Every structure is written in C-alpha cells, then in structure tokens.
Amino acid sequence: MNAESEKTTLGPGPTPDHLLHAGSEGEFSAEDVVLASGRDITPKNLAWAERRMAEKGRACLDELLP
C-alpha cells in the first residue's frame, strides 16, 4: 500500500489521525450541532441547534464534542 492510497482508503482498523477533525475551529452548521448531540436531523432539532448557535456561538459545538 503506498502513501497516496493510505490517505483515501478507509478499511478495517482505526481512522488515521490526518482524516479526523474535531472542534469548531472551522465553519459548522446547525446540522453539525444536531449530529454532535447524537440527535436525528429533524426540523425541530435544527431549530434547537440554530437557537443554541445564536446563544453560544462556537462554544455550542465544543460543549458537545469529547
């Protein structure tokens, strides 16, 4: 397996660190907040996430991620 195929191929075993990201250092959406909370994406949950984003800003996602 060469280095290039390792970058794009996901197989059994842990995900390589370079493919993982967490936190709110980049852009995120209400869908991201809903998924980080473990909820299904529904209109009600999206509205909840939008309110949470308006109240807490980037911290709303950081609070949900390990």
Image (cartoon, helix red, strand yellow):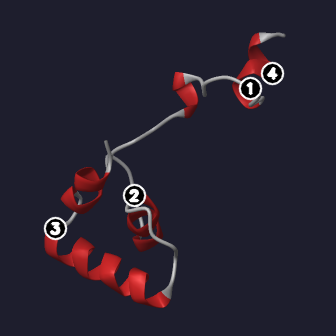
Q: Name the residue under label 4.
A: 5
Q: Distance between the residues labelled 1 and 4?
A: 14 Å
- The disc placed on residue 56 is 3
Q: Name the residue under label 2.
A: 27
Q: Distance between the residues labelled 1 and 3?
A: 37 Å
- In this figure, what is the number of numbered marks? 4
Tell me if label 1 and label 3 are in contact, CB under 8 Å: no
Relative to 27, does residue 6 appear above or below in the rendering? above
Q: Categorize mark 4 by other alpha carbons within 10 Å: few (<14), some (14-19), many (20+).
A: few
Q: Categorize mark 3 by other alpha carbons within 10 Å: few (<14), some (14-19), many (20+).
A: few
Q: Distance between the residues labelled 3 and 2?
A: 15 Å
Left or right for 37, reference 7: left
User: Residue sitting at 15 percent across and 75 percent down?
Assistant: 55
Relative to 46, does residue 66 appear above or below in the rendering? above
Please state which of the two labelled residues, at mark 3 or mark 2, is closer to the viewer: 3
In this rendered view, identify the residue nearer to me: 27 or 38.
38
Horizontal and vertical percent for residue 53?
26, 72
Q: Which of marks 3 and 2 is nearer the N terminus?
A: 2
Q: Which of marks 3 and 4 is nearer the N terminus?
A: 4
Identify the secondary structure beneath mark 3.
helix
Please state which of the two labelled residues, at mark 1 or mark 2, is closer to the viewer: 1
Tell me if label 1 and label 2 are in contact, CB under 8 Å: no
- In which quadrant will I find the C terminus? top left
Q: Earlier in the sequence, mark 1 or mark 2?
A: 1
Tell me if label 1 and label 4 are in contact, CB under 8 Å: no
